[in-house]
Amino acid sequence: MHPILFTIGDFSLYSYGLMMAIGVLVALRVLDSEARRYGWNTDLMTRLVVVTFLFGLLGARIAYVLTRISDPTTDVVALILNVRAGFVYYGGLISSWLYLSWFLYRHRKELPLWPTMDAMAMGICVGLAIGRIGCFLGGCCFGSGCDYPWGVTMVGDAHLGHVHPVQLYEFAMLMVFLAWMWWRRTRKAYDGELVVFYTGAYAIGRFVLEYWRGDLIRGFVWEPYVSTSQFLSLGFLPLAVWVHLKRRGTTPLKALKVQGKNS
């Protein structure tokens, strides 16, 4: 693993931070493509993506602190100040969706709710996928013991031996999700279909992947059987089903003709 890609003087380039930045840029490209396809304000979309990402970071950080604060050995101040590590994805998802919902309500004339949510689902999917590469390079979110040939040794945790590269499992899973959503985006049965698919599919996938996770800092609701993320997955899956039942049968918004071509 390569937590630090290189160091020049006092400056160090961390692989996790770099992959997060790349993830945001790629997500922006995906959202820009959808904005142009629908004829939306691309500057407004860019602002939405950047601020949603920041809210996601804040929520993920708060969720991580909450999972650790009950440990009597935890130095809460040091925990809060250590911003280089410690994020819970579902905390970021909840905070980002809350901000996104408020933003779209405020700008509902420029950005229709459900088509924008579908586009954001693709952006979040690809951003998280690239971020998982950062987790792999940085050595966090590692897996449990692995006896298969593809087992890896994590920097700083070599004593664990070979572990499942669960970060790469999730990357592969998310790229499959993205490929399906990208293909489906022009064939949607209703607006909201992509966000329903992503929310439900990720809930199932993440619940399963947690069984191969080996890092204990992610927290448990019922140790060692149900992790924090598994518990939240159990809530997001029925939510996706409920939205599907509410949205099915509605007519999807048609994309515009951009530069004389059907996008």
Image (spheres, helix red, strand yellow):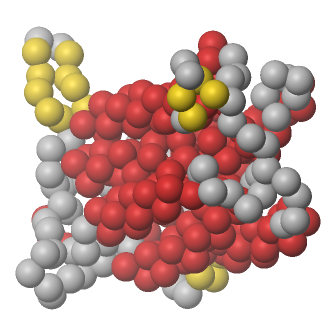
Q: Is residue 258 above or below residue 144?
A: above
Q: Position of residue 229 (x, y in %)?
A: 59, 68
Residue visible at 14% across and 51% down in the picture? 1
Along the viewing direction, whichever of 87 and 136 lies nearer the viewer: 136
In this rendering, does residue 168 appear at all? yes
Quadrant in the picture for residue 149: bottom left
In this rendering, position of residue 199 left or right of residue 21: right
Q: Residue furthest front?
A: 260
The residue nearer to you, when weighing 28 against 16, is: 28
| Residue at figure coordinates x 50%, y 51% from the top left | 182
- Is residue 86 in sight in this rendering? no
At horizontal 18% and vertical 61% (from top left) the residue drawn is: 154
Is 17 placed left or right of 197 in the picture? Answer: left
Position of residue 205 in the picture relative to residue 232 (left or right): left
Task: Name the residue: 50% across, 56% down.
Answer: 183
Above or below, 243 relative to 253: below
Give the quarter of the figure containing the C terminus: top right
Q: Position of residue 241 (x, y in %)?
A: 78, 73
Q: How many numbered marks does the figure carry?
A: 0
Question: Splitting the image into 4 quarters, where does residue 197 fall?
Answer: bottom right
Q: Would you place residue 248 above or below residue 109 in this image?
A: below
Measured along the vertical axis of the image, is residue 190 above or below residue 25? below
